[in-house]
Image (cartoon, helix red, strand yellow):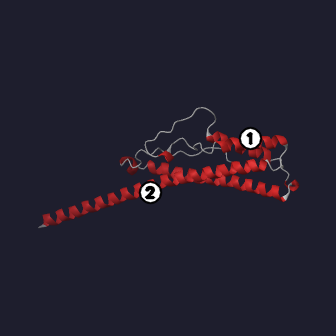
Amino acid sequence: MEQVNWGTFALIVIAALVVIAGLVWIITARRLDRLHRTVIQSRLTLNEALAHRAATAADFAACGVLDVAGAILLADAAQVALGQTHAPLSLDGLEDGPGHKRQRRDNGEDRSTTESNLSRTLRLVLDGVEHEEMDPEQQKRLDLLQESREDVKLSRRFHNAFVDQARRLRTNWVVRLGHMAGGAPMPQPVDMDDE
């Protein structure tokens, strides 16, 4: 009689452990999937913020505040950035889905270099801007440009924080043991000058 009770108890403990392991598995897999989706969404948000910054920079370059050289520099950097809004921010290919390998293009600058160049150009040309000489419309365009610069900083920081969370979770032994990431590539942060 004692054997049956111990046997039943052992079965109950084993069943409980299997249920707990299954729950940990499901919760971890869902969390990883949610983090991958969040990284993709934050990357899209960052792309929109970068496109908006380039558009407001081009608009500001044309408003007459800057000297001719500054306006040309800013307009050129903004147009190059606008021309690359379709280019990926990261070559990890996470947006493409599992198993898809993105072709790396070696011709021309990569997106982070282009965006960093726009950031440096903005710093260069905006340092000499006299605020008291601007009319209200020009001040409004400058304010929009400054807001778009802040949006880029925040969007990139949030994106990189989500990437860091996903990378940490993917190094978890449960994720590695269960191959929960499947064919999804390891998310990469977006490194660029955004000041």
| Residue 81 in sight in this render | yes
- Please name the residue that numbered disc 1 is placed on: 76
In the displayed image of the protein, which residue is found farthest to the top? 107
Q: Which mark is residue 41?
A: none
In the displayed image of the protein, which residue is found farthest to the right? 133
Decide: is 140 above or below 179.
below
Q: Nearer the viewer, residue 40 or 159?
A: 40
Please state which amino acid type lies under the numbered disc 1. Asp
Q: Nearer the viewer, residue 90 or 177?
A: 90
- Please name the residue that numbered disc 2 is placed on: 31
Please report the residue visible at 50 percent of the width from the left and 47 percent of the height from the top.
95
Dot 1 crowding, Cα within 10 Å, few <14, some 14–19, many 20+? some
Please state which amino acid type lies under the numbered disc 2. Arg
Locate residue 84: give its quadrant.
top right
| Residue 195 in sight in this render | no
Decide: is 103 above or below 140.
above
Point out the tag, 1 or 2, that comes first from the N-terminus.
Answer: 2
Decide: is 42 above or below 186.
below
**94 on left or right of 87:** left
How far across and how far down the image is residue 142, in percent?
78, 54
How far across and how far down the image is residue 55, in percent?
70, 49
**69 on left or right of 41:** right
Task: Report the mark closest to the observer, 1 or 2.
Answer: 1
How far across and how far down the image is residue 72, in percent?
79, 41
**4 on left or right of 164:** left
In space, the residues marked 1 and 2 are separated at their CA atoms by 43 Å
Q: Nearer the viewer, residue 166 or 96?
A: 96
Decide: is 1 above or below 151.
below
Dot 2 crowding, Cα within 10 Å, few <14, some 14–19, many 20+? some
Please report the residue visible at 82 percent of the width from the left and 55 percent of the height from the top.
138
